[in-house]
Amino acid sequence: MQKPIYRRIVLKISGEALAGERGFGINQDTLNSIADQIKEIHDLGVEIAIVVGGGNIWRGRNSDQMDRATADYMGMLATVINALALQDALENRDVQTRVQTAIEMKEIAEPYIRRRAIRHLEKGRVVIFAAGTGNPFFSTDTTAALRAAEIEAEVILLAKKVDGVYDSDPVKNPNAQKFESLEYIDVLNRGLGVMDSTATSLCMDNKIPIIVFGINEPGNIKKVIFGENIGTFVKG
Ligand code: UDP
């Protein structure tokens, strides 16, 4: 039987990936399909920590008429909404989960405590990290890099609507070429839209590989954890 090549992963799910065709909010069918995929790899014994974005609801950097820090706090709250939706979908599939948030809201989630998060993972619970890093001016990609370093994850699976990293926007340019692999430094130098530069640098400094792939295709997470080359592999 095929075995997963990773023991502990951080799965970063962008808010957009939860939105479905409408492009905003949460699409229940999309959410269900993502939860099915997560359950599939959870059943294989992979330790899964999820960092969820909020762009399907609110993005701080897009609101130029608002105080940036306030807009960013709104974005972090958006990630909590997505985290609870994911938790619900996973628990409906009998996957035990814990949401840990970087901004304390003790009525609905645990605060982020590194050692506790690791313990949950060891016990087979999926940990969902909400509220980003808890700091404005950061992104959930940076959160994924930070949490991956903290919990010693072997890889970041960067789940997106698009199926990898391209040399130009594949939605606008039909001739855009997909990269099979890249080095962090190329991502930084070429300004490729994989991750923001803070997140990319953090991964580079801590030698955490990133696999960018499309999550809206059922079965893709499983392919990635079995080592299939379906997206773009970013490393040093
Ligand atoms: N955010 C923040 N600090 C963080 C993480 C997120 O301020 O550590 C805010 C920021 O406004 C961001 C929003 O939360 O735009 C949603 O996160 P992100 O844009 O990373 O979500 P995604 O693009 O993955 O859906």
Image (tube, grey):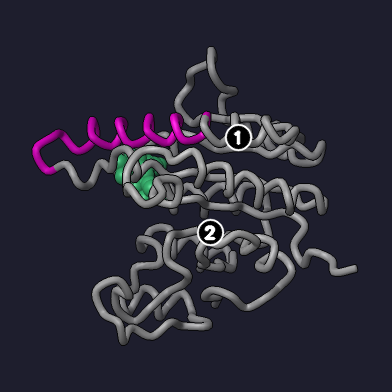
Q: Is residue 5 above or below residue 32?
A: below
Which class describes the residues within 10 Å of circle 1: few (<14), some (14-19), or many (20+)? Answer: many
Query: Quarter of the picture for ligand 1?
Result: top left
Task: Report whether 97 appears left or right of 86.
Answer: right
Q: Residue at x 73, y 53 (%)?
A: 41
Residue 67 painted magenta: yes
Q: Is mark 1 within 8 Å of ligand 1?
A: no
Q: Nearer the viewer, residue 68 or 14?
A: 14
Instruction: Examine the rendering and report whether any part of residue 93 can be seen.
Output: yes
Q: Residue at x 84, y 66 (%)?
A: 3
The residue beneath circle 2 is 215
Task: Report whether 102 appears left or right of 139.
Answer: right
The percent coordinates of residue 121 (x first, y second) are 74, 40
Residue 39 painted magenta: no
Quadrant placement of the N terminus: bottom right
Q: Label 1 is placed on what type of residue?
A: Ala
Q: Quadrant of residue 57?
A: top left
Q: Secondary structure at mark 2?
A: loop
Between the residue at mark 2 and the residue at mark 1, the CA separation in whole angstroms equals 16 Å
Which class describes the residues within 10 Å of circle 2: few (<14), some (14-19), or many (20+)? Answer: many
The percent coordinates of residue 159 (x first, y second) are 51, 58
Q: Residue at x 55, y 38 (%)?
A: 129
Q: Quadrant of residue 110?
A: top right
Q: Is residue 57 above or below residue 165?
A: above
The percent coordinates of residue 126 (x first, y second) are 69, 39
The part of the chain drawn in magenta is 64-84
Q: Label 2 is placed on what type of residue?
A: Ile
The residue beneath circle 1 is 89
First of labels 2, 1 by sequence position: 1
Instruction: Examine the rendering and report whether any part of residue 138 can be seen.
Output: no
